[in-house]
Structures are given as structure tokens and as C-alpha cells.
Image (cartoon, coloured by chain):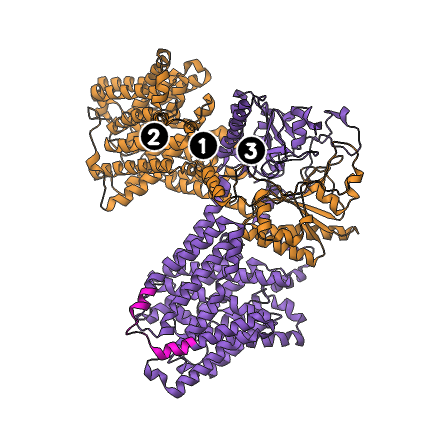
Chain colours: A purple, B orange
Amino acid sequence: MGRSNDGELETKEVDIASVSSSRRHAANEPCVHKVGVPPKPNLLKEFTATVKETFFSDDPLRPFKDQPRSRKFILGIQAIFPILDWGRDYNLSKFKGDLIAGLTIASLCIPQDIGYAKLANLDPQYGLYSSFVPPLIYAFMGSSRDIAIGPVAVVSLLLGTLLQNEIDPVKNKFEYRRLAFTATFFAGVTQFALGFLRLGFLVDFLSHAAIVGFMGGAAVTIALQQLKGLLGIRNFTKKTDIVSVMRSVFGSVHHGWNWQTILIGVVFLAFLIFAKYLGKRNKKFFWVPAIGPLISVILSTFFVYITRADKDGVQIVKHIDKGINPSSVQQIYFSGEYLTTGIRIGAVAGMVALTEAIAIGRTFAAMKDYQLDGNKEMVALGTMNIVGSMTSCYVATGSFSRSAVNYMAGCKTAVSNIVMSGVVCLTLFLITPLFKYTPNAILASIIISAVLGLIDYEAVVLIWKIDKFDFVACMGAFFGVVFASVEMGLLIAISISFAKILLQVTRPRTAVLGKLPRTRVYRNIEQYPDATKVPGVLIVRVDSAIYFSNSNYVKDRILRWLTDEEEQLKANGLPEIQFLIVEMSPVIDIDTSGIHALEDLYKSLQKRDVHLVLANPGQAVMDKLHASKFADHIGHDKIFLTVADAVLSCSPKTVDEV
Amino acid sequence: MGRSNDGELETKEVDIASVSSSRRHAANEPCVHKVGVPPKPNLLKEFTATVKETFFSDDPLRPFKDQPRSRKFILGIQAIFPILDWGRDYNLSKFKGDLIAGLTIASLCIPQDIGYAKLANLDPQYGLYSSFVPPLIYAFMGSSRDIAIGPVAVVSLLLGTLLQNEIDPVKNKFEYRRLAFTATFFAGVTQFALGFLRLGFLVDFLSHAAIVGFMGGAAVTIALQQLKGLLGIRNFTKKTDIVSVMRSVFGSVHHGWNWQTILIGVVFLAFLIFAKYLGKRNKKFFWVPAIGPLISVILSTFFVYITRADKDGVQIVKHIDKGINPSSVQQIYFSGEYLTTGIRIGAVAGMVALTEAIAIGRTFAAMKDYQLDGNKEMVALGTMNIVGSMTSCYVATGSFSRSAVNYMAGCKTAVSNIVMSGVVCLTLFLITPLFKYTPNAILASIIISAVLGLIDYEAVVLIWKIDKFDFVACMGAFFGVVFASVEMGLLIAISISFAKILLQVTRPRTAVLGKLPRTRVYRNIEQYPDATKVPGVLIVRVDSAIYFSNSNYVKDRILRWLTDEEEQLKANGLPEIQFLIVEMSPVIDIDTSGIHALEDLYKSLQKRDVHLVLANPGQAVMDKLHASKFADHIGHDKIFLTVADAVLSCSPKTVDEV
């Protein structure tokens, strides 16, 4: 490890070497510095520094430093409940912004919630419940000002898929719901634990590219699922892959489709997409797509009610329980066979929900330039889901679409979530019976128009341009979700992300360096074709820490560069290589396997009569070269501060050649 | 990925900038080079280059290049059977060396084999069988000249432990043996597949430190198991952890220990350890520890035979089948419930055996300076185990102790393995009945003295000195094996190795740079305390590729450096930071998440009125900065070849200050 941040380090030898000093004539000309031996850093300090960088890299205790005890206590409480901090500066003008934003996202979330609950195979009121309690808790504990909390499409689909693999949601409705609450509870526990143990960095292991692919795939899958509601099909497959769904859709063309349903669905879908387009073209009309869904619901419900289209086969919501969240503490499985299932599903759903919430939080924090403590966010999200699981909510998290609307509607603080929560509460008390005649087709249209926003073409194009491997991860996740299942897509996304990391550490790049004309700078001769090689000297740069996973490769690769070079020189009748300079600047660390590889390299070079010279090893590397006596072995005079100094020592003639 | 090896790249802009040219007066003084935009490398070429570096980094097809077809065919055959290559230069003087070495390792392997078979819960002859067929196959296909093939202690123990978890080796002897052959078959298939698919680099993921710890732990466990034979205990625990074994040993003090057995065992153990010591002190006596075990066996067997000590409770071998390996093709489970078990156990045992063989092969290849093709070795080892599983052998691999003896006895080629194989064959035909009266205690002594060599104190001390994290991995593996089980130790070793890689890519180091006096060189101010910061400029070096796993951390860390610096400057009343230079030399690659992080960094810096300047981005990074338009975004004039050039542009006054 050897990450040392203590400021007490001193180098033993920093005296200026006298090599070639006679040729120096101008004051600002270069001279040869020696690479000193850093003194062994204190083990405990080094360990503390490593732990700090790993788990407390955001320095969360900075404000606590040098504060009296009572102030520390207040700061601690404020850290857990940020509302106590920002609440003191709250004023009427901020509330105006929050009120408008809150009302806007409430009008958007009510129809979405009812639809998303269906994705999770739950009754519609559970979606509304999940938009009442969790946002309230988050408003007190969360630190993002723009995120809108509630059920989201991807997590609902994921939870629904994972749960129905265990229990049939139609035949065993009650057990299914109990397992859903159990999973929600453990999703919350997972989130809380990750934040509390400061393991928040684990969500970074799902790369941006993988998330883009996964979200896009999930959006397509969810949209396909909605064909059931949109076409009025009664017997629909339970699988989510595109092949099964398409077979199900076209297998029921002649006896399963309902034209009245299709008419309602398609008309309102067109309206919603047009509303979205309008909102996108002119930022002033951001509220059009936001209230579009509610207007669709009102209009279509009214239409079905007066025409009694439900008697012609148009499926309707039929029943939503009135009243706010009942307690569900007794329903969570704390023992029995479903406990481990609940933990497993909860952990997966919790991690995915977390990834989405953190991504949203970071995006808006960067836009408004405020800091977001990822670990604190996780604690807030975890608490909110734990409480949610006890009050009949399923997994809630930050919603992409509603957060964007929240931001554009001018929200100032998390109070907009409280306003939304209040509206949902009133809805539950007063008007849920009015949703009885809402056609399912309209919910399908709302979900389709919502999830279309998750398909991010532009991001995919950019990923293709920037990094081909990222593109493979993105497409892998996308096709995994679309053609297999949500879990498979997630698994592919994680696997490719890890494969990328492993490839990075297994096969680091190496480059041959040459001297840029009229400078003392040595650079990759591929990137800078006018860089020239120094006769008799081969300069190789290793672009990574030398660890067990790549030490053999690095050694072999350096020897291959040497062999290639010598073959070429021999073919052209040029003098042989006498010095191999390894530029170590990018080699930020080395471990025991790496030292062994260097020793093997040194032995092989000795057999070939080539001298090994090292340029600019860093602090940690220098430390280990000494601890292992390798520095004594090759000779301290073979270690230089820069490549230029090293070249100077190998063949003094070449350095002034321009 | 962007690993590009094609030599056709050109930089577009390499013209010399005219900045500050007036102040240049000597011909060899530095001038400002621009960082050009590398042209987009061809996608197919880039992909081919990546595949080549990943799977064919050792360039195995080099000798085939530019050869006629018939020659290619011969070279192909020779690649599969290296004996056809080196066999043509074989002569009598080489054979002399091989004969002596072969006879020496044969005398060492016969008693070891009988003991190791017991570790694997198999009858003694199976150990001998495994020293007959596999070494023969290896001699034809392997490329190491020094490795001695046969059963080894650690793999025997691992196989025995894993197998007895499935089938009781005493009650269901036949099924147990069938499963052992099945596991051996799939161990061979695993090894062959890894080599054939050129995935040999996977064995590098078990770090040197983890192997040292695992081997040491396995040696202790094996030695403890031998207390059964050494003390003549009849009821012994089946567990391998130290607590269970010690309880078993001391629970039977009063009624289970047999003094005659102890006497024989301890006397010969002392003799063997003395022989080892002698061999170590004087290299001329290398043969003493090598033939010590055989002498012990002969002496003790004769002693038991004439005293009939077996009637006084000294346990003896009793029976060894005469004759060479019977066929076991019919006994391998190719279907049924034990198939998957066999595959699982075989894969684990095969990987461990491979790791050991490759480590040995590499060690001796480095000593004699010849190249070893890891993937070809795996194909040879795999074939040998597949054939072995059909001829009543269990998993064979390279043995540490016997390979060392082989090397010291002056082996020249793999013919020493053929000689050893021949001697074992003769033994099986002629003298196995003579082993009837060999006391088990002597086998225990031989195994103990053999495995003691696997405990490598010196390596552990060196690991402690060089890398503390490696030490944790080493100790984790050691205590995992000793206190839990072989599998647990292996799991811990792999987990810690992976954790290290993940930590490396999640929390890369960063450093603040300063100018070394009287140079244009900028280095870490912690490593070089006389380096001075440039007023108004903060120079930060990022020591890793910026990938999804660390992009957020890197961004936050750079901002934290800036905040810390600004606080300090403010406290001292010094001018504020105006320029942030990010030294990108060690940043060898960047992905989409990394670009996003840079954009976020740029935005944050703009809010703080600090200019972002990049120094020396490499080829792949430059490529992606352009593809993403980030280079246009921050301005091409903000990207420099060196930190010195960047500083020059930020505050022209500072560069000549010495």
C-alpha cells in the first residue's frame, strides 16, 4: 500500500550530483538530481492514511475539527438530519419554488405510481403509499435538493420479476406482498449498511456505460410489457424477454386485442409524446409533459365512466383502497424460508435503487454545484426504505423523470418532496375511489412515455466515440435485459465492468520512448513520430503499477521490446543496445511479485550484456526497491530522476545532439 | 481500450510554438512542443492489437513467420511435442546428467508417493501409478527442463479434503476412487482448456504472497495430519483445522499413543531433518537428503520385519498391489450426480496444481535463462492428467522438493522424468510386496520433513518488509488453511488478492508537485521536500487511469487538494490559486465516466475562477479528449507537453526563478 500523506518525509540524498557539471554554463540549465531514499514512513500513519483515503476520502469530519463539544453534538445531529441545517435559512421565496415544484411532481407521480405498482405486481395503492412515507423521511435526512423520491419503473420491474420467480402474485397475493415488504426492508438495510460502513464506493463499480445500457434495456422491456395494457390482451406471458413478449402479442392478434382499448391507449400516448416534445423544444413549457399524465387520466376516466366502455372489454383499475398506509411490520418475514429469499432480492433491488439515486443526486448536485455525501445519502435512502417497508411501501428511490421536472419547476430544497407527499396523502384520503374507471391502457401509455426518456441515444453515440470497450459493456447490458431478463442484463453489466478492470491490471500498456528534437523530453514514439531513439539505448515506459497480476507480463513485454529492437538493429547493421532504461513515472506502486519480476528482468539482461537503468521511480516504489535490496543490487547510480539524466549517464555524447 | 501498436500514427501539429522564444539563447535549451491530436487509429487494427496483447503477448507464432508450408507443419508438431526439437541435439553427456538426476528423484519420489496417496485417502499404489504415466507424457509435451512431475503434498491434501466431503473414503472406497479419477480427468480438462484458450494469465491472479501463505499453511496442516501416523493414533479426526487435530491428538494421550511407533518415527524424522540440514549446508551433499527417505524406508521396513513390531501395535502399510497401472477409463463418471461434483473439485484442484507447476517452471527457467510458454505448459499438464485419469492416476503436477533435487543433481532435459518413470515402473513390477512391513510412522516422518521445506520464513519476512498488504494476504491464506480448511485458505487468498486489485483501481494516489531547484522538473513534494510550489498554481498528478471505478474519487480528491491549498494560502495571506495543472503522464487511459468526471471538475473550477490546464496526456487519453470534444471545451491551448511548459504559460515569470 504505502500511501503516505504525512508531511514529515525527508529525502536523504538531495545533493546535486557533479556528473557533467563542467558542461553546464547557464544558470537555468538542467542539472542531475539524485532520487533519494525516502525514510520508511511510520506504519501506523501509513495505515491510517490508507483507511482514510479508502473510507473517508470526502473528509466528512472536517467541520468537526477544533470545535467545542456542544457544537460537535449539534453538528452531529445536523449531519444526520440536514433539514436542521438548511431549514434555518428557509424562507417564503424558497417555499414558493418548492410549492410549485412539489405540486408539479405530485401530478406526475400519482398516475405513474399506480402504473409502477402494476409492474411490481402489486395493487395500485401500494405505489401511492410509496410516494407518501419515503419522500417525507428523505426530506429530513437527505442532502440532495433536487431528487424526487418514489417508486421508479426499473426497480419496480426488477422487484416484480425477482419476486414472481419465488411466489405467484395472483394465486398467493398475500404471501407475495409479505415477501415484497421483506425485500424492501432488506433493501433498506443494505443501503443503510453500505452508507454506514462507508462502502458507498461500491456503487461506482457499475460503470456509466453499463448503467446507460441497462436503463435502455429496462426501458424497452417495460415498454414491451405495456403492450398488454395498451392492446387489452388478457393472457400475457410472464416472461420479460422480447421473444416471449412478441410471441404473446402476435399470438393473440385475432382473439385477444380490444379495439376500444387500443384507441384510448394510442390517442393518449400520442398526446403524451407530443406534450413531451413540446416541453423539450421550449423550456417554458416544462409543465406540459409534467401535468399531461394527470390530464390524460382525468379525461380517459371520465370518458370510460360516461360511455361505460369497461362493458365492451376495456380493462379498468376497478378498485383502489381508500386511506393512508396501513402498518405492515407484522407482515415482514423475519424467519422461515422466505427470509433468505427476501434478503437476496432486497440486496439486489437495494443496490440498483441506490445506483439510480446516487447517479441522479450527483447529476443535479454538479449542475447546481453543491457537494453530495454519497454515504450519507445511502443512510437516508436506507432509513426511508426500512420505515417504508413497515408502512406498506415497496422499494422507493430517486426517479429520473420526476427529478428533472422537479429541477425545471424550480425546486429549492427537499420541501418539494414534502409538498408532493402531502398531495399524495390527500389523494389517498379523498379521491382514490375516483380512479375506479381509469382504463389500464392509459396507465400503459403513461409508463411508455415515461420510460422512453430512459433510452439515451446520445449517450450511446458518445460512448461509441470515446471508448469501444465501454460500448460493449453498454450493449451487453442492453441486449441482456431485452433478450434474456433484467437480472441477466445486470449480471452482464457487472461482469463486463469487472472484466475491464481486470484487463486493465493484467495487460498494462508499455511504450518505447524517444527524444523530442530540441528538448530534453522523452515521449512515446508512436504518439510523437518526430521523437528519435538514442543509439545504443532502449527506453521503455511501463504504464501501470507492477503487481502480481501483471508482473510476468511486464517483464516479458520489456524483453520482447528489446528482442524486437535488437533484431531491427542487426538487420540494419547498427550498434547493439547496451542500456535499457525503464521509465518508472507511471509505475506508482510495486509489490513482492513485481520486485521478483524486476529481479528476473535484471538477470535476463545481465545474460545479454545489457545494463538496466531506472528513471524516476516514485516514493512508494523507491521505498520497496530499498526494502528488497533491489536498489543495492542494480546499483544506486543506476536510478535517475529523469529519463534525460539517465540517457546522459549512458552515453554522454547524445544529450547535446540536436 | 485503444491499445494501438501500429506504427503509422502521425501527429498533426508538431510545429514549435513561438511562446517566449525570445528568452531562449542556447541551442540545447527547451522549447514548447504542442501535444498533437493523434489520428483516430483504425478500429480493426486496434482490436487486433488488443487481442494480441491479451492472449498472444508472448508472440508464440514468431518462429512460424515467413516459413514455407512444410516447415510450418514441422514447427507445429515440434510446438506440441518439444521433445522432437531438443531431442535432436540430445547426446550421451546430457544423458549422463539426466540419468543421475532421474535415479535421485526416483529414490525420493517412491516413499513420498506412498505417503501422499494416503493424504488423498487412496491406496499407496495410486501414488506410484501417478509417478509413472504423467511424467512420461510430460517429457514429450512439456517445455521445462527441470520440473519433476508426480503427486504433490498440497494437491493430495486438497483433493483428499474435497473428495471426502462428498464420499466416505473408507465405507465407499470404490465410489470414492471413481470420483477421484473423475476429478483428475476434469482437472486435466481445465488445465488443457486454459492453455488452449490462452487464458494462462488467469493463474497470475493468485499473488506470490498468497501462494507463500497458502503453501505454508498447507505444510503445517499436512504435518499436523502426520501426527496420526507418527504417534500411532487409531481414532483420528477427519477435520484438518489445528483445533480439531490438537484435540484429537491430546484426547488420545493415555490410550491411543504407541511408544514403539513414536520411537521409530521420531528417530527417523531426526535423521531426515539432519540429512536435510547437511544437504543445505554443503551443496555437494545434495544427494544425502534425496536418498535419505529411501534409506529410512529400507532400514525401518527391515527392522519391523525382523522384530515383528507390527504385532505390538506399530501400524504398517500391509498391502500394495503389484503390477503397473490398470485402466480406469470405465470408472470415470461421465454422467450422474457425481459428474458436476467431479467437475467442481477437478477445476479447483487443477487450478491449484497449475499454479504450483507454473511457479516452479518459471523459477527454474529464470535460473537457467530459457523461456517457458505458460500456455503450452498448461496444455502439456492437462494432457498428462487426462491420460493419467484413464490409467488409475490422480492429479499430478510439478513438485517443489523433487524439482529442486532434480536441478541440483544436474538434470539437462525432461529425460530425467523418463528415467524416474522407468524406475517407478520397475518398482511396481518387482518390489512393491517388499513395502508390506513399512511402518506408517516412517511415511509420516518423510512427509513432515518434505513439507517443512514449503514453509518459507524468508519470503514472509521479505513480504513484510516490501508490502504490508501482501503480508495481510499471506497471513490470511496461512491462518485460513491452518484454522479453517484448505478451501477456506484458498478462498481468502483469492479474495484478498482481488480486493487489492479493486482497491488499486478505486483509490488511486494523487500527489501535489513542486519544482526541483535549478531544473525544469516537477516532482511530488512529499518525495522531494526541496521541491517548491509555484505561486498561484497548483499542480496535481493523478497516478492511474481514470475509469468508472475511480472517476468520482479522482475528481473529488483534486478538488480537496485545491480546497486544502486555498485554506492554507488564505491563512498565510498569500495570493489565491489561479491555475490548476493536472499532470496526466500516469493517466494512461480514460473512459466515458472519466470524461464526465473531468467535465464536472471543469465546471466546478469555473465556478471558483480557476483555470484547468492539462499536462502530457498520452495517446489514448488525447484521442478520447478529442472524441468527446472536451479538448475543444477547455481549449487546445490549455494542453501542454510537460508541466514545465504548462507552468510557463500560466505565469511566465516563475520559470526562470531559481
Q: Position of residue A633 (x, y in %)?
A: 58, 24
Which residue has dot 3 on it? B465
Instruction: Characterize the local packing of mark 2: few (<14), some (14-19) or many (20 or more) Cα atoms within 10 angstroms.
Output: many
- Marks 3 and 1 belong to one chain: yes
Region of the chain picked out in magenta, as a range: A246-266
- Marks 2 and 3 belong to one chain: yes
Query: Which residue type does callout 2 highlight?
Result: Ala
Q: Is residue A252 magenta?
A: yes
Q: Position of residue B259 (x, y in %)?
A: 30, 26
Q: Is residue B501 left or right of residue A48?
A: left
Query: Which residue type does callout 3 highlight?
Result: Lys
* Secondary element at image label 2: helix
* Secondary element at image label 1: loop
Q: Chain of mark 1?
A: B
**CA–CA distance between discs 1 and 2?**
19 Å
Which residue has dot 2 on it? B380
**CA–CA distance between discs 2 and 3?**
37 Å
The numbered mark, 2 or 3, whose residue comes first in the sequence reads 2
Say if B647 sits above or below A593 in the image. Answer: below
Image quadrant where residue B235 sits? top left
Q: Position of residue A389 (x, y in %)?
A: 44, 68
**CA–CA distance between discs 3 and 1?**
35 Å
